[in-house]
Amino acid sequence: MTADQSSTSNAQRPLEPIQADTGMPQWLTANLKTIIAGIVGAVLVAVLIAGYRWYDERTTRAAIDRLGEIMAMDSGATQVKELTAFAASAPKDLRLNAQFLLADAAMESGDYTTAATAYATIESSAEKALALTAGLGRAAALLKDGKADEALRVLNGMRTKAPQTFMNIILVQTTVAAEAAGNKAEALAAFEALADLPGGAENPYYAYKIAALRASLAGS
């Protein structure tokens, strides 16, 4: 096609029909409802997101205020009860803190079962370092509750996955749990593992306990 032919063809192409009552092209008029619906939908989504964020922030502020009220109470069974209820329905951003506060309050009030449960909840949902810290807390609560065998199982499970930085404190707590459970072999193994850690061989208490436990096991 020559330039003249192209010019003639363009000149003969009809213009987009105009809707007389709106002054808009017919294609725009025909699709106007769909376009407006899309715009309104996008605006509504934006409004809903903004509203949710406002509601979420407001809910979080109210929850923080409520948590402050609970912590201002005298420690004891009432505080533990209120923290238990709060932790069950707390906003996600506060849930972990609420569980730690509950565990601490329960330990202080002597409710070791509730403390162990709170620590177990943290273990299942927190990142690794916090989960290990909670595991130590759960073992301590179980020991206080007279459940040394269960505490020992928790600690032995932690030893298989804990980094070296946690090993000293886990082993120390293992010696306590093992002796409380009357498990001399486990206690000896834990003391020997402590002696193998950097600086452990120079610890006279470890040497004493290893010798005493070996003698006790040999004589039994």
Image (cartoon, rainbow, N blue to C red):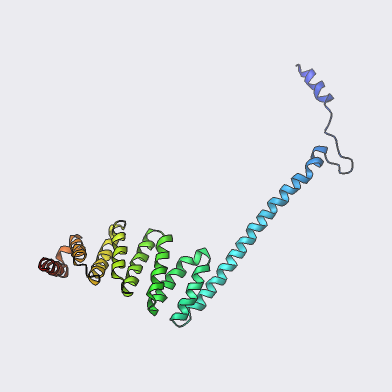
Left or right side of 51 for 96: left
Image x and y of residue 131, in percent: 38, 62
Rendered position, 162 above or below 38: below
Q: Residue at x 22, y 70 (%)?
A: 182
Nearer to me, 106 or 60: 106
Q: Quadrant of residue 168?
A: bottom left
Image x and y of residue 169, in percent: 27, 66
Left or right side of 138 for 85: right
Q: Residue furthest bottom?
A: 74
Left or right side of 162 for 185: left
Q: Quadrant of residue 35?
A: top right
Quarter containing the C terminus: bottom left
Image x and y of residue 98, in percent: 47, 70
Rendered position, 11 above or below 61: above
Q: Residue at x 47, y 79 (%)?
A: 79
Q: Residue at x 16, y 70 (%)?
A: 205
Image x and y of residue 191, in percent: 19, 65
Nearer to me, 112 or 76: 112
